[in-house]
Amino acid sequence: MAAVTKAPRGTLDKLPSIAYKYRAVENIALEIANLSGYREIRTPVFEHTELFRRSVGDTTDIVQKEMYTFDDKKGRSLTLKPEGTAPVARAVIENGLLNEALPLKLCYITNCYRYEAPQSGRYREFSQFGAEVYGANTPLCDAELIALAFTLIERLQIPQSCYKIEVNSIGCPECRKIYQDALKKYYEQFKEELCHDCHTRLTNNPMRLLDCKVPTCAKFKNDAPLILEYNCDDCSDFFATFKMALETLNVPYHVNPKIVRGLDYYCNTVFEFVCENGLVFGGGGRYNGLMKELGGADTPASGFALGIERIVSVIEGYATSSDVQSTQNVPEMYIAGIGEQSAMLALKLSHELREEYGIQCLCDIVGRSVKAQMRFADKTGAKFSIVIGDDEIANNVATLKNMENKETLEVTLNASEISKNI
Ligand code: ATP
Ligand code: MG
Protein backbone atom coordinates (compact mmCIF):
# COMPACT_ATOMS: atom_id res chain seq x y z
CA MET A 1 0.00 0.00 0.00
CA ALA A 2 2.96 2.34 0.40
CA ALA A 3 2.68 3.23 -3.27
CA VAL A 4 -0.83 4.51 -2.63
CA THR A 5 -0.30 6.40 0.60
CA LYS A 6 3.17 7.78 -0.03
CA ALA A 7 4.00 10.48 -2.57
CA PRO A 8 6.74 9.69 -5.10
CA ARG A 9 10.26 10.41 -3.88
CA GLY A 10 11.38 13.99 -4.39
CA THR A 11 7.88 15.46 -4.59
CA LEU A 12 6.39 17.85 -2.11
CA ASP A 13 2.76 18.18 -1.03
CA LYS A 14 2.03 21.83 -0.44
CA LEU A 15 -0.45 21.52 2.40
CA PRO A 16 -2.84 24.39 3.22
CA SER A 17 -0.50 25.59 5.99
CA ILE A 18 2.06 26.49 3.32
CA ALA A 19 0.24 26.48 -0.03
CA TYR A 20 -1.00 30.02 0.57
CA LYS A 21 2.61 31.21 0.66
CA TYR A 22 3.20 29.75 -2.80
CA ARG A 23 0.03 31.44 -4.04
CA ALA A 24 1.13 34.76 -2.54
CA VAL A 25 4.62 34.57 -4.09
CA GLU A 26 3.13 33.67 -7.47
CA ASN A 27 0.54 36.44 -7.37
CA ILE A 28 3.03 39.10 -6.30
CA ALA A 29 5.50 37.91 -8.95
CA LEU A 30 2.94 38.18 -11.76
CA GLU A 31 1.70 41.54 -10.49
CA ILE A 32 5.20 43.03 -10.43
CA ALA A 33 6.11 41.51 -13.80
CA ASN A 34 2.97 42.99 -15.35
CA LEU A 35 4.02 46.45 -14.16
CA SER A 36 7.15 46.15 -16.32
CA GLY A 37 5.18 44.90 -19.31
CA TYR A 38 5.79 41.16 -18.98
CA ARG A 39 2.81 39.09 -20.11
CA GLU A 40 2.21 35.61 -18.83
CA ILE A 41 2.77 32.62 -21.09
CA ARG A 42 1.86 28.99 -20.32
CA THR A 43 3.45 26.13 -22.18
CA PRO A 44 2.83 22.35 -22.05
CA VAL A 45 4.15 20.17 -19.26
CA PHE A 46 5.94 17.99 -21.83
CA GLU A 47 7.82 18.75 -25.02
CA HIS A 48 9.71 16.80 -27.65
CA THR A 49 12.90 15.55 -26.00
CA GLU A 50 14.90 17.03 -28.87
CA LEU A 51 13.96 20.56 -27.75
CA PHE A 52 15.83 20.18 -24.47
CA ARG A 53 18.75 18.37 -26.04
CA ARG A 54 19.19 21.30 -28.40
CA SER A 55 18.50 24.13 -25.98
CA VAL A 56 19.69 22.99 -22.58
CA GLY A 57 22.53 21.09 -24.25
CA ASP A 58 23.68 17.49 -24.52
CA THR A 59 26.64 18.10 -22.23
CA THR A 60 24.67 19.37 -19.24
CA ASP A 61 23.71 17.41 -16.14
CA ILE A 62 20.06 18.16 -16.88
CA VAL A 63 20.11 16.42 -20.25
CA GLN A 64 22.56 13.70 -19.33
CA LYS A 65 21.06 12.63 -16.02
CA GLU A 66 18.02 14.51 -14.88
CA MET A 67 15.30 14.38 -17.51
CA TYR A 68 12.01 12.53 -17.17
CA THR A 69 11.92 11.12 -20.68
CA PHE A 70 9.40 8.62 -22.00
CA ASP A 71 7.99 7.35 -25.27
CA ASP A 72 4.31 7.97 -25.90
CA LYS A 73 2.08 5.33 -27.49
CA LYS A 74 3.22 6.33 -30.97
CA GLY A 75 6.86 6.01 -29.97
CA ARG A 76 7.59 9.74 -29.85
CA SER A 77 10.22 10.69 -27.28
CA LEU A 78 8.79 13.26 -24.90
CA THR A 79 10.25 14.91 -21.80
CA LEU A 80 8.64 16.62 -18.83
CA LYS A 81 10.05 20.11 -18.88
CA PRO A 82 13.14 20.44 -16.71
CA GLU A 83 13.16 24.24 -17.06
CA GLY A 84 11.00 26.99 -18.48
CA THR A 85 13.03 28.82 -21.09
CA ALA A 86 13.24 26.23 -23.88
CA PRO A 87 9.45 25.73 -24.10
CA VAL A 88 8.90 29.50 -24.11
CA ALA A 89 11.48 29.99 -26.86
CA ARG A 90 9.85 27.18 -28.84
CA ALA A 91 6.39 28.73 -28.42
CA VAL A 92 7.74 32.15 -29.46
CA ILE A 93 9.15 30.73 -32.68
CA GLU A 94 6.21 28.45 -33.45
CA ASN A 95 3.61 31.18 -32.95
CA GLY A 96 5.52 33.97 -34.62
CA LEU A 97 5.54 36.15 -31.49
CA LEU A 98 8.65 37.91 -32.74
CA ASN A 99 6.44 39.61 -35.34
CA GLU A 100 4.80 41.53 -32.50
CA ALA A 101 6.28 44.76 -31.16
CA LEU A 102 9.78 44.09 -29.85
CA PRO A 103 11.10 43.73 -27.26
CA LEU A 104 8.79 40.88 -26.39
CA LYS A 105 8.51 40.47 -22.63
CA LEU A 106 7.14 37.22 -21.27
CA CYS A 107 6.85 35.69 -17.83
CA TYR A 108 5.79 32.30 -16.57
CA ILE A 109 5.14 30.19 -13.53
CA THR A 110 5.63 26.53 -14.22
CA ASN A 111 6.34 23.19 -12.64
CA CYS A 112 9.65 21.62 -13.64
CA TYR A 113 10.82 18.03 -13.40
CA ARG A 114 14.35 16.82 -12.81
CA TYR A 115 15.45 13.39 -11.68
CA GLU A 116 17.89 14.54 -9.00
CA ALA A 117 18.97 13.13 -5.65
CA PRO A 118 16.38 14.68 -3.34
CA GLN A 119 17.72 16.75 -0.47
CA SER A 120 16.85 19.98 1.24
CA GLY A 121 15.78 22.49 -1.42
CA ARG A 122 16.14 19.93 -4.19
CA TYR A 123 13.06 18.17 -5.48
CA ARG A 124 12.08 16.12 -8.51
CA GLU A 125 9.06 18.31 -9.06
CA PHE A 126 9.53 22.00 -8.32
CA SER A 127 8.27 25.30 -9.67
CA GLN A 128 9.87 28.34 -11.20
CA PHE A 129 8.89 31.92 -11.80
CA GLY A 130 10.69 33.20 -14.87
CA ALA A 131 10.85 36.34 -16.97
CA GLU A 132 12.36 36.72 -20.42
CA VAL A 133 12.98 39.48 -22.92
CA TYR A 134 13.35 38.80 -26.66
CA GLY A 135 14.70 41.39 -29.06
CA ALA A 136 16.83 43.56 -26.76
CA ASN A 137 20.60 43.25 -26.69
CA THR A 138 21.50 45.83 -24.09
CA PRO A 139 22.89 45.96 -20.57
CA LEU A 140 19.83 48.02 -19.58
CA CYS A 141 17.58 45.11 -20.45
CA ASP A 142 19.60 42.79 -18.20
CA ALA A 143 19.59 45.31 -15.35
CA GLU A 144 15.82 45.74 -15.67
CA LEU A 145 15.37 41.96 -15.43
CA ILE A 146 17.43 41.74 -12.26
CA ALA A 147 15.55 44.71 -10.83
CA LEU A 148 12.31 42.80 -11.39
CA ALA A 149 13.57 39.83 -9.36
CA PHE A 150 14.94 42.20 -6.72
CA THR A 151 11.58 44.00 -6.43
CA LEU A 152 9.89 40.64 -5.83
CA ILE A 153 12.41 39.73 -3.12
CA GLU A 154 11.89 43.14 -1.51
CA ARG A 155 8.09 42.80 -1.63
CA LEU A 156 8.46 39.47 0.14
CA GLN A 157 10.46 41.36 2.79
CA ILE A 158 13.43 39.06 2.60
CA PRO A 159 16.15 41.04 4.37
CA GLN A 160 19.08 42.10 2.19
CA SER A 161 21.47 40.63 4.74
CA CYS A 162 20.18 37.12 3.92
CA TYR A 163 21.23 36.89 0.32
CA LYS A 164 23.44 38.27 -2.43
CA ILE A 165 22.86 39.09 -6.06
CA GLU A 166 26.00 37.88 -7.76
CA VAL A 167 26.78 39.03 -11.28
CA ASN A 168 29.40 38.23 -13.87
CA SER A 169 30.12 38.56 -17.55
CA ILE A 170 31.06 35.50 -19.57
CA GLY A 171 31.86 37.57 -22.64
CA CYS A 172 31.04 36.83 -26.25
CA PRO A 173 31.85 33.61 -28.17
CA GLU A 174 35.13 35.13 -29.39
CA CYS A 175 36.63 36.20 -26.07
CA ARG A 176 35.18 33.19 -24.30
CA LYS A 177 37.01 30.85 -26.67
CA ILE A 178 40.36 32.22 -25.49
CA TYR A 179 39.21 31.90 -21.89
CA GLN A 180 38.08 28.32 -22.33
CA ASP A 181 41.45 27.36 -23.72
CA ALA A 182 43.12 28.89 -20.67
CA LEU A 183 40.70 27.15 -18.34
CA LYS A 184 41.30 23.83 -20.02
CA LYS A 185 45.03 24.25 -19.75
CA TYR A 186 44.70 25.07 -16.06
CA TYR A 187 42.51 22.04 -15.25
CA GLU A 188 44.62 19.68 -17.32
CA GLN A 189 47.34 19.92 -14.64
CA PHE A 190 44.95 18.21 -12.20
CA LYS A 191 43.46 15.77 -14.66
CA GLU A 192 44.30 12.73 -12.52
CA GLU A 193 42.44 14.17 -9.52
CA LEU A 194 39.25 15.25 -11.31
CA CYS A 195 35.98 13.33 -10.93
CA HIS A 196 34.58 11.27 -13.77
CA ASP A 197 32.13 14.01 -14.87
CA CYS A 198 34.87 16.63 -14.88
CA HIS A 199 36.96 14.47 -17.19
CA THR A 200 34.15 14.68 -19.73
CA ARG A 201 33.64 18.39 -19.04
CA LEU A 202 37.31 18.97 -19.80
CA THR A 203 36.74 17.98 -23.41
CA ASN A 204 33.07 18.82 -23.92
CA ASN A 205 32.25 21.81 -21.78
CA PRO A 206 35.21 23.26 -19.84
CA MET A 207 33.22 26.09 -18.22
CA ARG A 208 31.11 23.54 -16.38
CA LEU A 209 34.28 22.54 -14.52
CA LEU A 210 33.69 25.61 -12.36
CA ASP A 211 30.21 24.30 -11.51
CA CYS A 212 31.30 20.92 -10.13
CA LYS A 213 30.00 20.31 -6.62
CA VAL A 214 32.30 17.36 -5.82
CA PRO A 215 34.58 18.71 -3.03
CA THR A 216 37.80 17.28 -4.50
CA CYS A 217 37.12 19.16 -7.74
CA ALA A 218 35.64 22.31 -6.22
CA LYS A 219 38.96 23.19 -4.57
CA PHE A 220 40.63 23.75 -7.95
CA LYS A 221 38.18 26.54 -8.62
CA ASN A 222 40.09 28.86 -6.27
CA ASP A 223 43.06 29.46 -8.54
CA ALA A 224 41.31 28.98 -11.87
CA PRO A 225 41.67 31.79 -14.44
CA LEU A 226 38.87 34.38 -14.27
CA ILE A 227 36.67 35.03 -17.26
CA LEU A 228 36.34 38.74 -16.53
CA GLU A 229 40.03 39.12 -17.24
CA TYR A 230 39.43 37.69 -20.70
CA ASN A 231 36.44 39.89 -21.68
CA CYS A 232 37.15 41.86 -24.87
CA ASP A 233 36.66 45.65 -24.92
CA ASP A 234 33.06 45.49 -26.13
CA CYS A 235 32.13 42.92 -23.49
CA SER A 236 33.87 44.93 -20.76
CA ASP A 237 31.92 48.03 -21.81
CA PHE A 238 28.68 46.05 -21.76
CA PHE A 239 29.43 44.83 -18.24
CA ALA A 240 30.37 48.33 -17.03
CA THR A 241 27.09 49.81 -18.30
CA PHE A 242 25.17 46.88 -16.82
CA LYS A 243 26.66 47.56 -13.38
CA MET A 244 25.96 51.27 -13.73
CA ALA A 245 22.33 50.52 -14.56
CA LEU A 246 22.03 48.29 -11.47
CA GLU A 247 23.41 51.14 -9.37
CA THR A 248 20.92 53.54 -10.98
CA LEU A 249 18.12 51.15 -10.02
CA ASN A 250 19.52 50.76 -6.48
CA VAL A 251 19.94 47.03 -6.93
CA PRO A 252 22.69 45.78 -4.59
CA TYR A 253 25.08 43.40 -6.37
CA HIS A 254 28.40 41.65 -5.96
CA VAL A 255 30.67 40.71 -8.81
CA ASN A 256 31.49 37.00 -8.64
CA PRO A 257 33.83 36.21 -11.54
CA LYS A 258 33.27 32.48 -11.03
CA ILE A 259 29.61 32.24 -11.97
CA VAL A 260 29.24 30.64 -15.39
CA ARG A 261 26.60 29.23 -17.64
CA GLY A 262 28.26 26.49 -19.55
CA LEU A 263 26.26 26.73 -22.74
CA ASP A 264 27.56 28.10 -25.98
CA TYR A 265 24.62 30.34 -26.61
CA TYR A 266 25.00 32.27 -23.35
CA CYS A 267 26.91 35.53 -23.50
CA ASN A 268 27.77 38.59 -21.44
CA THR A 269 25.51 38.81 -18.42
CA VAL A 270 25.07 35.95 -15.95
CA PHE A 271 23.76 36.22 -12.40
CA GLU A 272 22.62 34.24 -9.39
CA PHE A 273 20.63 34.91 -6.26
CA VAL A 274 22.49 33.22 -3.43
CA CYS A 275 21.24 32.82 0.11
CA GLU A 276 23.73 33.23 2.98
CA ASN A 277 23.52 29.46 3.62
CA GLY A 278 24.75 28.83 0.09
CA LEU A 279 21.35 27.94 -1.37
CA VAL A 280 21.00 29.38 -4.87
CA PHE A 281 17.39 30.39 -5.29
CA GLY A 282 17.55 31.83 -8.77
CA GLY A 283 19.70 32.56 -11.73
CA GLY A 284 19.72 33.88 -15.21
CA GLY A 285 21.59 35.54 -17.97
CA ARG A 286 21.73 36.52 -21.57
CA TYR A 287 21.23 33.78 -24.19
CA ASN A 288 21.57 35.53 -27.51
CA GLY A 289 22.28 32.32 -29.42
CA LEU A 290 19.28 30.30 -28.29
CA MET A 291 16.68 31.37 -30.84
CA LYS A 292 19.00 30.64 -33.76
CA GLU A 293 20.00 27.30 -32.21
CA LEU A 294 16.30 26.37 -32.19
CA GLY A 295 15.82 27.34 -35.81
CA GLY A 296 14.24 30.75 -35.23
CA ALA A 297 15.37 34.18 -36.39
CA ASP A 298 18.62 35.24 -34.77
CA THR A 299 17.19 37.25 -31.87
CA PRO A 300 18.91 38.35 -28.68
CA ALA A 301 17.28 37.17 -25.47
CA SER A 302 17.79 37.42 -21.75
CA GLY A 303 15.98 36.12 -18.69
CA PHE A 304 15.99 34.58 -15.26
CA ALA A 305 14.24 31.85 -13.29
CA LEU A 306 13.63 31.79 -9.56
CA GLY A 307 12.88 28.52 -7.76
CA ILE A 308 9.63 29.06 -5.87
CA GLU A 309 10.21 26.24 -3.33
CA ARG A 310 13.54 27.81 -2.45
CA ILE A 311 12.01 31.30 -2.20
CA VAL A 312 9.33 29.97 0.13
CA SER A 313 12.00 28.28 2.25
CA VAL A 314 13.86 31.61 2.47
CA ILE A 315 10.62 33.34 3.49
CA GLU A 316 10.08 30.69 6.14
CA GLY A 317 13.57 31.24 7.46
CA TYR A 318 13.90 35.00 7.32
CA ALA A 319 10.83 36.96 6.36
CA THR A 320 7.46 37.75 7.85
CA SER A 321 6.01 39.49 4.84
CA SER A 322 2.67 41.07 5.57
CA ASP A 323 1.77 40.66 1.89
CA VAL A 324 2.22 36.92 2.26
CA GLN A 325 0.58 36.61 5.68
CA SER A 326 -2.49 38.49 4.53
CA THR A 327 -3.26 35.73 2.05
CA GLN A 328 -3.53 33.14 4.81
CA ASN A 329 -6.93 31.55 4.66
CA VAL A 330 -8.52 32.58 7.97
CA PRO A 331 -12.30 33.05 8.19
CA GLU A 332 -13.57 36.47 9.12
CA MET A 333 -16.71 35.17 10.70
CA TYR A 334 -18.35 32.09 12.18
CA ILE A 335 -22.13 31.94 12.64
CA ALA A 336 -23.30 29.27 15.07
CA GLY A 337 -26.89 28.09 15.25
CA ILE A 338 -28.82 26.36 18.05
CA GLY A 339 -31.59 24.21 16.60
CA GLU A 340 -32.92 23.65 13.13
CA GLN A 341 -34.40 27.07 12.41
CA SER A 342 -31.26 28.84 13.61
CA ALA A 343 -29.04 26.55 11.58
CA MET A 344 -31.04 27.49 8.47
CA LEU A 345 -30.69 31.22 9.25
CA ALA A 346 -26.95 30.80 9.91
CA LEU A 347 -26.64 29.10 6.52
CA LYS A 348 -28.55 31.91 4.79
CA LEU A 349 -26.65 34.76 6.51
CA SER A 350 -23.28 33.12 5.80
CA HIS A 351 -24.19 32.80 2.14
CA GLU A 352 -25.27 36.46 1.95
CA LEU A 353 -22.13 37.71 3.73
CA ARG A 354 -20.01 35.83 1.18
CA GLU A 355 -21.99 36.68 -1.92
CA GLU A 356 -22.93 40.29 -1.25
CA TYR A 357 -20.12 41.53 0.97
CA GLY A 358 -17.17 39.27 0.08
CA ILE A 359 -16.74 38.27 3.70
CA GLN A 360 -15.26 34.86 4.37
CA CYS A 361 -17.84 33.27 6.63
CA LEU A 362 -18.41 29.74 7.96
CA CYS A 363 -21.38 28.09 9.65
CA ASP A 364 -22.19 24.60 10.90
CA ILE A 365 -22.83 22.02 8.20
CA VAL A 366 -22.30 18.88 10.25
CA GLY A 367 -25.01 19.28 12.92
CA ARG A 368 -22.77 19.92 15.93
CA SER A 369 -23.81 21.16 19.36
CA VAL A 370 -23.26 24.89 19.88
CA LYS A 371 -20.33 24.13 22.20
CA ALA A 372 -18.68 21.99 19.54
CA GLN A 373 -19.40 24.67 16.92
CA MET A 374 -17.60 27.30 19.00
CA ARG A 375 -14.67 24.97 19.60
CA PHE A 376 -14.43 24.52 15.82
CA ALA A 377 -14.69 28.30 15.26
CA ASP A 378 -11.77 28.78 17.65
CA LYS A 379 -9.68 26.23 15.78
CA THR A 380 -10.27 27.95 12.44
CA GLY A 381 -9.04 31.25 13.91
CA ALA A 382 -12.27 33.04 12.92
CA LYS A 383 -12.06 36.71 13.93
CA PHE A 384 -15.75 37.22 14.80
CA SER A 385 -18.63 34.99 15.81
CA ILE A 386 -22.37 35.14 16.29
CA VAL A 387 -24.58 32.58 18.03
CA ILE A 388 -28.19 32.39 16.84
CA GLY A 389 -30.87 30.77 19.03
CA ASP A 390 -34.63 31.13 19.44
CA ASP A 391 -34.32 34.45 21.38
CA GLU A 392 -32.11 35.96 18.68
CA ILE A 393 -34.60 34.96 16.01
CA ALA A 394 -37.52 36.37 18.05
CA ASN A 395 -35.76 39.73 18.66
CA ASN A 396 -33.93 39.82 15.32
CA VAL A 397 -30.81 40.82 17.26
CA ALA A 398 -27.68 38.84 18.16
CA THR A 399 -24.35 39.36 19.89
CA LEU A 400 -21.37 39.84 17.63
CA LYS A 401 -18.23 38.74 19.42
CA ASN A 402 -14.68 39.72 18.58
CA MET A 403 -12.89 36.41 19.17
CA GLU A 404 -9.53 38.08 19.83
CA ASN A 405 -10.32 40.77 22.41
CA LYS A 406 -13.66 39.24 23.46
CA GLU A 407 -15.51 42.55 22.97
CA THR A 408 -19.18 42.18 22.12
CA LEU A 409 -21.74 44.26 20.26
CA GLU A 410 -25.47 43.85 19.61
CA VAL A 411 -26.28 43.69 15.88
CA THR A 412 -29.46 43.36 13.86
CA LEU A 413 -29.64 39.92 12.29
CA ASN A 414 -29.14 40.80 8.67
CA ALA A 415 -26.08 40.56 6.47
CA SER A 416 -25.83 44.28 5.80
CA GLU A 417 -25.78 45.19 9.52
CA ILE A 418 -23.33 42.42 10.36
CA SER A 419 -20.99 43.42 7.54
CA LYS A 420 -20.88 47.02 8.80
CA ASN A 421 -19.67 45.94 12.22
CA ILE A 422 -16.80 43.63 11.41
P1 ATP B 1 21.53 23.93 -8.74
O1 ATP B 1 22.91 24.42 -8.96
O2 ATP B 1 21.00 24.18 -7.36
O3 ATP B 1 21.33 22.52 -9.20
P2 ATP B 1 20.60 24.84 -11.27
O4 ATP B 1 21.75 25.60 -11.78
O5 ATP B 1 20.37 23.47 -11.75
O6 ATP B 1 20.60 24.84 -9.65
P3 ATP B 1 18.72 26.44 -12.73
O7 ATP B 1 18.65 25.47 -13.83
O8 ATP B 1 19.43 27.72 -12.94
O9 ATP B 1 19.30 25.71 -11.43
O10 ATP B 1 17.22 26.72 -12.20
C1 ATP B 1 16.85 27.97 -11.63
C2 ATP B 1 16.35 27.79 -10.22
O11 ATP B 1 15.42 26.72 -10.11
C3 ATP B 1 17.41 27.44 -9.21
O12 ATP B 1 18.09 28.58 -8.78
C4 ATP B 1 16.59 26.85 -8.10
O13 ATP B 1 16.01 27.85 -7.28
C5 ATP B 1 15.49 26.14 -8.83
N1 ATP B 1 15.81 24.70 -8.93
C6 ATP B 1 16.61 24.07 -9.81
N2 ATP B 1 16.61 22.75 -9.58
C7 ATP B 1 15.78 22.54 -8.51
C8 ATP B 1 15.34 21.39 -7.80
N3 ATP B 1 15.75 20.16 -8.14
N4 ATP B 1 14.49 21.56 -6.76
C9 ATP B 1 14.06 22.78 -6.41
N5 ATP B 1 14.42 23.91 -7.05
C10 ATP B 1 15.28 23.80 -8.08
MG1 MG C 1 20.81 21.58 -10.97
Image (cartoon, grey):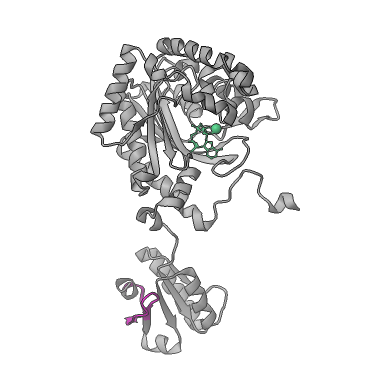
* Residue 333 lies in quadrant: bottom left
Residue pushed farthest right? 1
Q: How many labels were placed on the picture?
A: 0
The residue at the point 44 percent across, 32 percent down is 283
Is residue 225 a member of the stretch shown in magenta? no
The residue at the point 58 percent across, 20 percent down is 59
Is residue 403 a member of the stretch shown in magenta? yes
| Image location (x, y in percent) of residue 246 | 28, 31
Residue 295 in view (yes/no): no
- Is residue 322 shown above or below 367? above
Residue pushed farthest left? 248
| Image location (x, y in percent) of residue 341 | 49, 82
| Image location (x, y in percent) of residue 353 | 39, 68
Magenta region: which residues?
Answer: 400-416
- Is residue 415 shown above or below 263? below
Q: Nearer the viewer, residue 267 or 413?
A: 267
* Residue 61 lies in quadrant: top right
Q: Nearer the viewer, residue 200 or 87?
A: 200
Residue 287 in view (yes/no): yes
Q: Nearer the viewer, residue 414 or 56?
A: 56
In the image, ligand 2 is in what quadrant? top right
- Compared across the picture, whether 99 is left or right of 240 comes to right
The residue at the point 64 percent across, 32 percent down is 68
| Image location (x, y in percent) of residue 293 | 49, 16
- Quarter of the image where the C terminus is located: bottom left
* Residue 35 lies in quadrant: top left
